[in-house]
């Protein structure tokens, strides 16, 4: 059975949790393959709302095996807190699998993340301060701590002491902070062993065996394409590969096993943190989208920057990821607008760009070239087929699909679990 990759098409917060939940009853495994607890999914089931940060959203569906694979960086205290919160609400989390090769976020990673960001001042990246970037940096520098190291106290001590030998000099001499005790870090990590042990596995082997056994495996990306470390708006990006290619390196399954790539995209655009955003709104329309769409970060609570739909970004996402299907979400948020602008190209110093400029400076100075579509006032949250939508909403979706580089296979029309129009089968 081919693998399915689900990624964000913009700067995150597109509603990937809702899309995963839509698929979950037909899949056997849901895999988080990148990122850490620096992003979140919100899933609404009936009257219950679940905010997930580190766990794959498939954990909410009985029978699905959730997996945190090797490409993820894990704050174990956050993992346990999230599991406890779900257990207290009657959710069975006993099937969770955690890669032995995943890297661990420690206290010194969190500390360095916060002090470094403050030190940058006006040049801040806009990180969440949760230690994600420093942990990935240690991974690349080959001084990281992996989940498996926690079960070998001698190896763990060697690695923590070696890492802190340099980092404590940095904290004390550059940032004027107190040194961090290696013993305290080691003691904390060792305290997790007993509870963690039953979850730890060779997840790459397990996932490949699942695919060979004709199981359906969904790979769920954290963050989104425009935050990818290689293909996003660098340096205002995350520290991992949030694109479809990251599903292979972040999980240990071959790229030839991926046959479907689903990209989730909002009917407008948002981003959190610093960086270029051509369609960003600073007026009452931006406030309207923020308020009606409740555009505040699931993990951070930060208000999101809001703007109109950006068709060049959609096409860029389709190319970079090999998108086969888009899921467009939050169409209902646009209800009530008299007209709805869409960015169809950019103006950069008087030159039209129909695609995302390769030069970051050009993209930073890009101004949107807008096309306008008539809005609608009818409530669409009860629509379950495309024909249920008002004519103007149908025309808007059809126009976006033609601009975006792949078919729109599902349309989100509200926050409820079943508030979605399915146009094409996303699994078969």
Image (cartoon, rainbow, N blue to C red):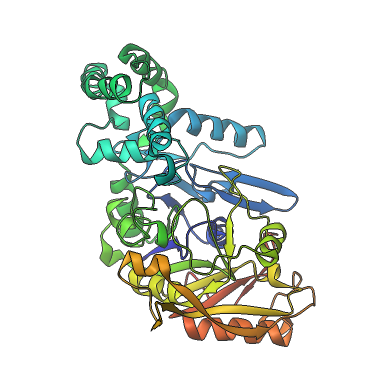
Q: Is residue 230 left or right of residue 29?
A: left
- Residue 363 percent across, percent down from the top left: 39, 68
Quadrant in which residue 419 is drawn: bottom right
- Residue drawn at x 34%, y 13% is 181
- Residue 231 percent across, percent down from the top left: 32, 62
- Residue 299 percent across, percent down from the top left: 56, 43
Q: Is residue 309 left or right of residue 104?
A: right
Q: Nearer the viewer, residue 316 or 197?
A: 316
Quadrant containing the N terminus is: bottom left
Image vertical order of residue 29 relative to residue 187, above or below: below
- Residue 104 percent across, percent down from the top left: 35, 32
Image vertical order of residue 61 relative to residue 401, above or below: above
Q: Is residue 79 left or right of residue 184?
A: right
> How many numbered circles are shown?
0
Visible residue check, residue 373: yes
Q: Nearer the viewer, residue 4 or 114?
A: 114
- Residue drawn at x 63%, y 55% is 295
Q: Nearer the viewer, residue 396 or 419?
A: 396
Residue lying furthest front: 349
- Residue drawn at x 35%, y 74% is 319
Visible residue check, residue 1: no
Image vertical order of residue 410 relative to residue 225, above or below: below
């Amino acid at each position: 059975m081919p693998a399915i990759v689900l990624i964000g098409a913009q700067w995150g917060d597109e509603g990937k949790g809702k899309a995963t939940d839509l698929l979950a009853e037909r899949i056997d495994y849901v895999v988080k393959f990148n990122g850490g607890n620096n992003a979140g999914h919100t899933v609404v089931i009936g009257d219950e709302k679940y905010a997930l940060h580190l766990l794959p959203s498939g954990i909410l569906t009985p029978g699905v095996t959730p997996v945190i694979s090797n490409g993820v960086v894990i704050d174990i205290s956050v993992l346990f807190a999230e599991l406890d919160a779900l257990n207290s609400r009657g959710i069975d989390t006993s099937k969770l699998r955690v890669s032995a090769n995943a890297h661990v976020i420690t206290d010194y990673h969190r500390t360095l993340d916060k002090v470094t960001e403050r030190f940058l001042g006006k040049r801040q990246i806009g990180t969440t301060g949760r230690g994600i970037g420093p942990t990935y940096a240690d991974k690349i520098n080959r001084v990281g701590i992996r989940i498996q190291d926690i079960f070998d106290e001698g190896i763990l001590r060697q690695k923590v002491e070696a890492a802190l030998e340099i980092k404590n000099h940095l904290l004390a001499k550059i940032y004027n902070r107190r040194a961090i005790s290696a013993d305290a870090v080691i003691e904390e990590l060792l305290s997790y062993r007993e509870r963690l042990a039953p979850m730890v596995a060779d997840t790459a082997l397990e996932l490949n065996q699942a695919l060979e056994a004709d199981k359906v495996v969904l790979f769920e990306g954290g963050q989104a394409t425009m935050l990818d470390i290689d293909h996003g708006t660098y340096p205002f990006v995350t520290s991992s590969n949030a694109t479809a290619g990251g599903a292979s390196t972040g999980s240990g399954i071959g790229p030839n096993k991926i046959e479907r790539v689903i990209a989730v995209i909002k009917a407008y655009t948002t981003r959190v943190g610093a960086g270029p955003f051509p369609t960003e709104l600073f007026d009452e329309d931006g406030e309207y989208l923020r308020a009606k769409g409740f555009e505040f970060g699931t993990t951070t609570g930060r208000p999101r920057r809001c703007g109109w739909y950006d068709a060049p970004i959609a096409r860029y996402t389709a190319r970079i990821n090999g998108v086969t299907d888009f899921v467009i979400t939050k169409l209902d948020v646009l209800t009530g607008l008299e007209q709805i602008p869409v960015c169809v190209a950019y103006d950069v110093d008087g030159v039209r760009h129909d695609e995302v400029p390769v030069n970051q400076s050009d993209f930073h100075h890009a101004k949107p070239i807008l096309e306008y579509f008539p809005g609608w006032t009818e409530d669409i949250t009860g629509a379950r087929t495309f024909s249920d939508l008002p004519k103007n909403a149908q025309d808007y979706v059809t126009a976006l699909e033609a601009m975006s580089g792949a078919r729109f296979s599902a349309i989100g029309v509200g926050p409820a679990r079943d508030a979605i129009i399915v146009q094409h089968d996303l699994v078969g």
